[in-house]
Amino acid sequence: MNAALTLPARSDRLGTLLALIGLAAVAFLPFVVFKSNRIMPGEAHSLFEVLPLPWAVGFAGLLALVGGVAVLARGARLRLLVALLGLAAVAVAVAFAADLLTPAGNRIVRISPGAGCWALLLAAGLLSTDAIARLGPGPAMRVFGLVLFGVVTAVAFHAGLFDHLSIMREYVGNASRFAREARQHVLLALGSLTAAVIVALPVGILCHRVPRIRAAVLQVLNLIQTIPSIALFGILMVPLGALATAVPLAAEVGIAGIGAAPAVIALFLYSLLPVVANTVVGLGRVPAATVEAARGMGLTPGQVLRQVELPLALPVILTGIRIVLVQNIGLVTIAALIGGGGFGTFVFQGMGQTAIDLVLLGAIPTVALAFSSAVLLDALIDVMKKAPQ
């Protein structure tokens, strides 16, 4: 009786929730969806319908093991190990299911992960994220984990493990465009960020040195942030289009009402507030005694700024840059609506053609790029915080 009463107290609440999600996914949701072509409605298949019975039972047993560890185990390393095992098992199972359902030599049918597969991936992903948070790995270990995951994923794709999945069919048909749009996506995100840092850093320093202008500058930049991205893209199309018409040289260098120009300008404007605000906050946190000591040593105001204030404020400034980079990677997707290019091209083309796999071809790399950027910059910020000043 006492053991029965203490069991719920020993169970992990998040693990229990994730285990229930996994159970519901296997029992009630389709594991894969078979479509005769990319736009036709699909036929849902459960795990036990598509996999041979021994494989399905073994896979279900492995998922049960993952769920049991999630509910009962407290050790973060064990939880991480079984979560990664679960992720790998789901990936292999859906690839195997696609192989079984695809007729030999057929390039038209589409096999997509079903709701159950996505739910299992979500549950295992959240379990691994929770385990990593409990372990609290250092910057180097986080970067190593990201690189290792990327290498394993690249090897799996190169080996053709997922070739029969619908998203890979879309990639094969758009391989040359994919590389071009990937470059455009990165260039738009990094280019607008670079321009914003060049402008926002001096503005933030000025706001720190001249407090009476700080509120007005931040209010103006905050006002820009309130404008919806679609509206700002549309607003910029009119003056840029007029400029391209009036000044032929502007059109020759790529300035026009549609395309990369309005996208870069809009992203630049959205990037200003986080960098300016974090520069002001970072400089404001520099101890006054440290600044006075530097001045007492005979350093000029410029030397104090470069050698004392900015190095101490750099972790906070980098936090603003991290926010901007992740934000821009997402907003570049919307810029495809005005001809800006990037992964959003596949997203909106897929929406127009009711081809969800084409949407995923643009959405998944965008999420992966934003996540990787956040991990790398978070690691850099942690290193800067721990570095001796």
Image (cartoon, rainbow, N blue to C red):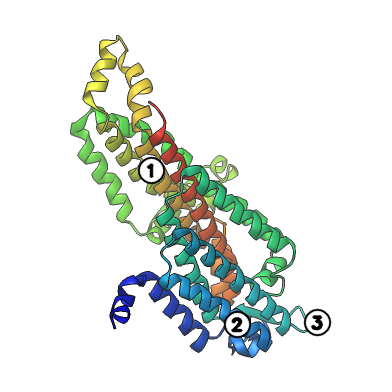
Q: Secondary structure at mark 3?
A: loop
Disc ID at residue 104: 3
Q: Secondary structure at mark 1?
A: helix
Q: CA distance from mark 1 to mark 3?
A: 51 Å
Against 12, is 333 above or below?
above
User: Outermost residue, left direction?
Assistant: 212
Pointer 1 or 3: first along the chain: 3
Residue behind mark 1: 319
Q: Amino acid at mark 2?
A: Val
Q: How many marks?
A: 3
In the image shown, does 56 or 221 lie closer to the viewer? 56
Q: CA distance from mark 2 to mark 3?
A: 18 Å
Name which residue lies at 26% across and 16% down: 293
Could you tell me if the residues under marks 2 and 3 are in contact, i.e. CB atoms within 8 Å?
A: no
* Lateral position of residue 288 relative to residue 334, left or right: left
Q: Secondary structure at mark 2?
A: strand
Against 201, is 174 above or below?
below
Q: Amino acid at mark 1?
A: Thr
Q: x, y percentage for residue 345? A: 57, 63
